[in-house]
Image (spheres, grey):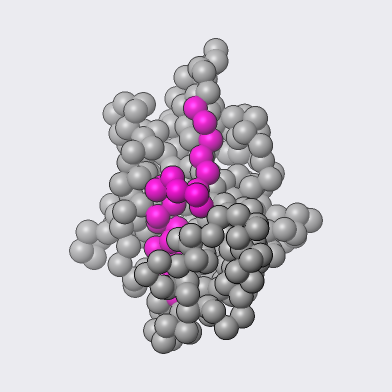
Amino acid sequence: MRDRIAILLSLFLSAGVMWSQQQAPASAPANSQQSMPGMDMSTHDMSNMKGMSMGADKGDGDSDAGAHAMHSMEGHMDMGPHMKMTALRQPQPGDAERAKQIVESARKASEKYIDYHAALNDGYKIFLPNFPQKIYHFTNYQYGFEAAFSFNPEHPTSLLYEKHGDDYKLIGVMYTAPKRFGEDELDQRIPLSIAQWHEHVNFCTAPPGRNGEYLAPHPQFGLKGSITTQEACDAAGGTFHPVIFNWMVHVYPFEKNQASIWSVDRQHGDAD
């Protein structure tokens, strides 16, 4: 079981890396309810691994693999060596008003989905709906594709929900941007004096025959691994990837003040 989980996770992440390196335009992939939010998806560098599905329609080992990948993703706010965040900039004229407009657009776009059934009816897909998570991503892959080329604050890539019994409570949205973007380009989308984007970095893929080490108590490889440099990864026989996922940022538009709306601390909490 552990080997199946680790092998699928390795293939999942490795495929994402290779796919994300293809920057040529392509058609949007088919929607998949089990696709990983935040993974590269065609040219928009965002979401679904083309042709991969992980969840209830797979065996238990496959579902567990997806859950392990999500758990790694949910640890992304720990600010360890596998996580990079944009630095807060000095406020510039117009930043506050621009951020306010984004929040208003995010609220307008998402409030219609307070009832999560409306999101499902509009084509949003839940990642791993049958596996317990703190935050569930309902992803619109058309909007994710769009985010490769332009920013529309009324088109968040994902809606963020907490699950309460059989119901889901809408708490926020997630925007994405291509991982090739520099901070100036991110600042054009959302002012970096207000928001902090994050991406996943320094990933070392395990060499053949050592996939089980992804799940070791103190792993060398993967998003939780101790290896963080090209040299160390080469020495261990792995394959190093400086960046594996694209830029992401959470916004909580139903909160009452700017600190809560753009709270990095809350993202830390959501990641636990």
Q: x%, y% of residue 115?
A: 32, 53
Q: Which residue lies furthest to the left in this view?
A: 165
Residue 96's place in the image compared with 217, above or below, is above
Residue pictured at 42% horizontal, 73% vertical: 215
The magenta span reads 65-88
Residue 214 drawn in magenta: no
Q: Quadrant of residue 173?
A: top left
Q: In which quarter of the image is the N terminus?
A: bottom left
Residue pictured at 51% horizontal, 73% vertical: 9
Q: x%, y% of residue 27?
A: 72, 61
Residue 174's place in the image compared with 60, above or below, is above
Residue 134's place in the image compared with 1, above or below, is above
Residue 186's place in the image compared with 45, above or below, is above
Residue pictured at 22% horizontal, 59% vertical: 164
Residue pictured at 60% horizontal, 54% vertical: 229
Q: Quadrant of the C terminus?
A: bottom left
Residue 70 drawn in magenta: yes
Q: Which of 49 and 14 is in front in this view?
A: 14
Q: Nearer the viewer, residue 268 or 94?
A: 268
Q: Can residue 30 be seen in this view?
A: no
Q: x%, y% of residue 56?
A: 41, 79
Q: x%, y% of residue 65?
A: 45, 75
